[in-house]
Image (cartoon, rainbow, N blue to C red):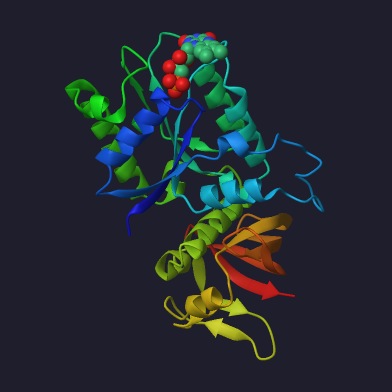
Amino acid sequence: MPARILTLCGSLRARSSNRSILRAYAQLAASRMTFEHYERMGTLPHFNPDLDCEGGALPAEVLELRRAVSTAEALLISTPEYMHGLPGAFKNVLDWLVSDPGFVGKRIVILHAARGSTWALDSLREVLRTMSAEVIEAASVSLPLGSNQLDEDAMLARDDLRALLRQSVETLASTLAKAPNQTLPPATAADEALAVLDRFTAAFNHQDVAGMDATLHFPHLFPGSPPVIWQHAGSAPADFFPKLVASGWAFSRYTKREVILVSPERVHLLVEYDRCRADGSVLSQQSALWIVTRIDGRWGIQVRSNR
Ligand SMILES: Cc1cc2nc3c(=O)[nH]c(=O)nc-3n(C[C@H](O)[C@H](O)[C@H](O)COP(=O)(O)O)c2cc1C
């Protein structure tokens, strides 16, 4: 399955050169990756911590943004610099993603029109580092556009720009072919467990059974009466996702991931998540105890005990 990439443009300008960079990249990579271009930055409400907390009502625009981010394997960002900083509208997008578990560990490529000034880029890197994202530096590229008037076709007509973008596409493709933890070694057992949860949900939201199995340990236990045990990969019922989709489900998102017990080989987490419709409305709320274990050096979810 081609990798799903979400592009984020930091400019609202209709003829934005940063948007053209992202569109040119998508054209070049079209045979390897699929692209969703996030174009709703202008209608995103201003960030308000009162809404972004337990019990707060997240605006539909924010849920839509988070859905787009959590279902993407990587983000592609291109942003202008305004007065030596990030554009306010774009910083607002990042602020809404700070508490989004789907953003943690997200792999990000930064594209940029070289203008000699790097205040905004330096700030962007600092913000992304603080948000625990992973910038793929080897794929991040500065383009000597010369003017901010070029559209995507004009960019692709230039050999130098096309070569830089193509090299970035190749690097991104080979990075995405590796498991995320090969490029981002989490520091602690709890970080490892949370990274597994991110990968699990990304695969789940793609309805990617093999990808989901790759985040589990077997035998995989669902306690109950009687308990259900998946002895090996491929044990998920064939109608699992069709049934879920028929119920109106489009994606799931965590609302809580509380680490309650940690040892070097085992992490217990209180996990709450919403099953959501495509418009972001909640279909059902789930709470569970998940146990993530380390076996032969690999972390995987071993027990999922729902309330
Ligand atoms: C309000 C404003 C402030 C700007 N400040 C800077 C700046 O501090 N440094 C810089 O290199 N360019 C600055 N620029 C130039 C923009 O980065 C440049 O026009 C860029 O191409 C805009 O991106 P876009 O084509 O995607 O809209 C500024 C432009 C505007 C409108």
Figure check: 157 above or below 295: above
> Which residue is at 21% across, 28% downward?
163
The image quadrant of residue 250 is bottom right
Residue furthest to the bottom: 226
Q: Is residue 8 visible?
A: yes
The image position of residue 161, as x and y in percent, is 25, 24
Q: Is residue 118 visible?
A: no
Q: Quadrant of the C terminus?
A: bottom right
In this rendering, position of residue 114 left or right of residue 236: left
The image position of residue 129, as x and y in percent, is 57, 31
Count up the numbered dots: 0
Figure check: 264 above or below 138: below
Residue closest to the eye, 70 or 16: 16
The image quadrant of residue 169 is top left
> Which residue is at 65% across, 57% downward?
254
> Which residue is at 26% across, 25% downward?
155
Residue closest to the eye, 240 or 113: 113
In this rendering, position of residue 100 left or right of residue 238: right
The image position of residue 217, as x and y in percent, is 51, 69
The image position of residue 20, as x and y in percent, is 36, 29
> Which residue is at 56% across, 83% downward?
229
